[in-house]
Image (tube, grey):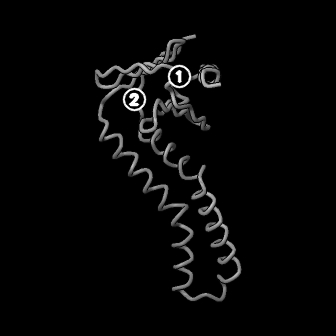
Amino acid sequence: MRFDYTYRNTAADYWMYFFCNIYTRWTGFINLVFIASVIALMISRWGTSGAFGKSVMVFALSLFLVIQPIALWIRSVKQVEIIGEVDTRLILAEGGLTISVRGHNQHINWQDYRGTVKRPTFLLLMPDEQHGYILPNRVMGKDREAAYAFLKGIKS
């Protein structure tokens, strides 16, 4: 099999990556516990709180529901600006993974390939410990499951 994708990541792709990265780790659990605690506090103490207490509760709730997503969006936009108008080309074939970015070509044999992470809106291809390539569903289209099965079969 062979899969060949040429694409450019968008701010939305990076935002989803950063967001998934937070909420698939223990920090996501802590965020959810904090949100639930603030909601419980708001339900139980809203009527007896003064203006300052209410504003602190609203700020605490908006910290993870509004401020954090906006901060991640700003980070995503900056990531797109850093990368610039550059396409990424990934070729997944029996002989290995070929990556082309900014005229730099790299071939990675499957025995040296670290792994693939499957998320709802993208696959994260990790050729080594320091690099990862976000491959969004919009790029893979109907080939997503076949590409993931191919990658999963390579590492098993």
x%, y% of residue 48? 65, 89
- Quote the CA–CA distance across marks 1 and 2: 27 Å
Please name the residue shown 57% across and 69% down the image: 61
In this view, the mark in front (1 or 2)? 1
Q: Residues within 10 Å of mark 2 (few under 14, many from 20)?
A: some
- From this view, report whether residue 148 is shown above or below residue 28: above
Q: Tell me the tag on residue 85.
A: none
Task: State the count of labels.
Answer: 2
Circles 1 and 2: CB atoms closer than 8 Å: no
Residue 22 in the figure: left or right of residue 87 = right
Q: Residue at x 52, y 79 (%)?
A: 55
Instruction: Look at the image and tell me in which quarter the C terminus lies.
Output: top right
Q: Position of residue 102 (x, y in %)?
A: 29, 25
Q: Residue at x 44, y 52 (%)?
A: 72
Residue bearing the label numbered 2: 8
Work out whether 120 lies above or below 25.
above
SS for dot 2: loop
Q: Quadrant of residue 85?
A: top left
User: In what element is the residue under mark 1?
Assistant: helix
Q: Quadrant of residue 39?
A: bottom right
Mark 1 sits on what residue? 111
Q: Is residue 46 left or right of residue 131?
A: right
Return the residue nearer the eye: 72 or 155.
Answer: 155
Residue type at tag 2 = Arg
Q: Quadrant of residue 49?
A: bottom right
Give how far across and how far down residue 119 sits, in percent. 60, 38
Relative depth, front residue between 141 and 97? 97
